Amino acid sequence: MRERLMGRTGLRVSELCLGSMTFGRETDEETSRAILDAFVEAGGNFIDTADVYSTGGSEEILGRWLSKRGRRDDMVIATKVRLPMGEGPNERGLSRKHIIEGVEASLRRLRTDHIDLYQVHAWDPDTSLEQTLSTLDSLVRAGKVRSIGASNFSGWQLQKAVDISRERGWEPFTCLQPLYNLLDRETEWELLPVCRNEGLGVLPWSPLRGGWLSGSIRRGMQEPPSGTRVETAERMGWGESWSAYQDERTWRVLDALFAVVEETGRPPAQVAVNWLLRQPDVTAPIVGARTMDHLTSHLASVDWELEATQLQRLTDASAQRLPYPYSVQAKHV
């Protein structure tokens, strides 16, 4: 894998980030460690987790693996805070209390004295942004956190956070972790321009949208394949559910995806990830791997490039109708 710079931080990360949400859940510890070893062997150095993944289990598996490697500084470890970690009234959100308790708990589970990238998992409407940002700044100054970032923010929320940190002289957000893939391109309307203008790295999550772009779903199907994440999402009401995506635009994107698959001889998942890697604002897509086969497929996404015509075909097929005011602004570019 090649290296890419994380925004303007000077930090170099692998062009794929290994997501560990499945560790301790669908993926047992032995398999998780094998996946981590294979990722590093392939040149990966960037791993993303969160305190809420397997209620801390993902961080614990990663921590035990890190403690046996011996070269902690070779790795860039990212984790997150915000979502509920228990039933207590303060075991959630972005208050000073929860963030400080959260980082201390993550450090213990990860068995490390610092976190390379600490991200707020989502916006917290109940806590002043000043309290959240000042707390994150104090963690950087204390050496417990090296860089900070955000996930699942809107454009105005991200810009406001950047502006407040600049005004107060606090450590700024260095990256954004948004939903971004061939089926979800709303990130391009506000968030990517903010990241571009402010020099933030971009770490897309769900590059295959829960399996929609993995090749298991095609036009003409009346329901999701049995045993897939999309089927589970439909039952659980998750964002990547069948009812949320089964429409003509999705079928148009999948038609184009399979056409490019035929031309390249590459699996759909590799084509979808390769398209994302070629987007100019993207630093490193976050790829999850329940099995070693999943990781092997993801790793094969980086050693080739879509031709310009193929890249454009996928971009055109996945284009979304622009709502106001973007529709008016586009006419005057």
Image (spheres, rainbow, N blue to C red):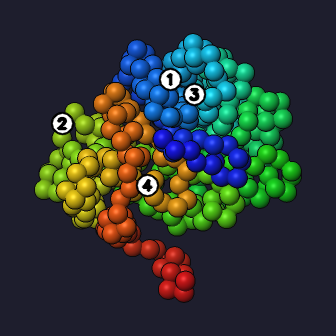
Question: Closer to the N terminus: mark 4 or mark 2?
Answer: 2
Viewer-nearest residue: 245 or 303: 303
Please give the name of the residue rendered at 57% of the width and 12% of the height, measured from the top-left corner: 68
Label 4, label 2: how many angstroms apart (C-alpha)?
27 Å
Query: In the image, 71: left or right of 169?
Result: left
Question: Closer to the N terminus: mark 3 or mark 1?
Answer: 3
Please give the name of the residue rendered at 37% of the width and 67% of the height, measured from the top-left corner: 308
> Which amino acid does the dot numbered 2 rest on?
Ser
Residue at which label 3 appears? 51
Residue at which label 2 appears? 226
> Which amino acid does the dot numbered 3 rest on?
Asp
Q: Which mark is residue 9?
A: none
| Residue 89 visible at all | no
Q: Which mark is residue 58?
A: 1
Label 3, label 1: how many angstroms apart (C-alpha)?
8 Å
Please give the name of the residue rendered at 45% of the width and 58% of the height, measured from the top-left corner: 278
Residue 143: image location, x then y, percent: 80, 30
Question: Closer to the N terminus: mark 2 or mark 3?
Answer: 3
Query: In the image, 87: left or right of 132?
Result: left
Residue at which label 4 appears? 276
Question: Is the residue under label 2 in contact with that under label 1 (CB below 8 Å)?
Answer: no
Residue 307: image location, x then y, percent: 35, 63
> Which amino acid does the dot numbered 1 rest on?
Ser
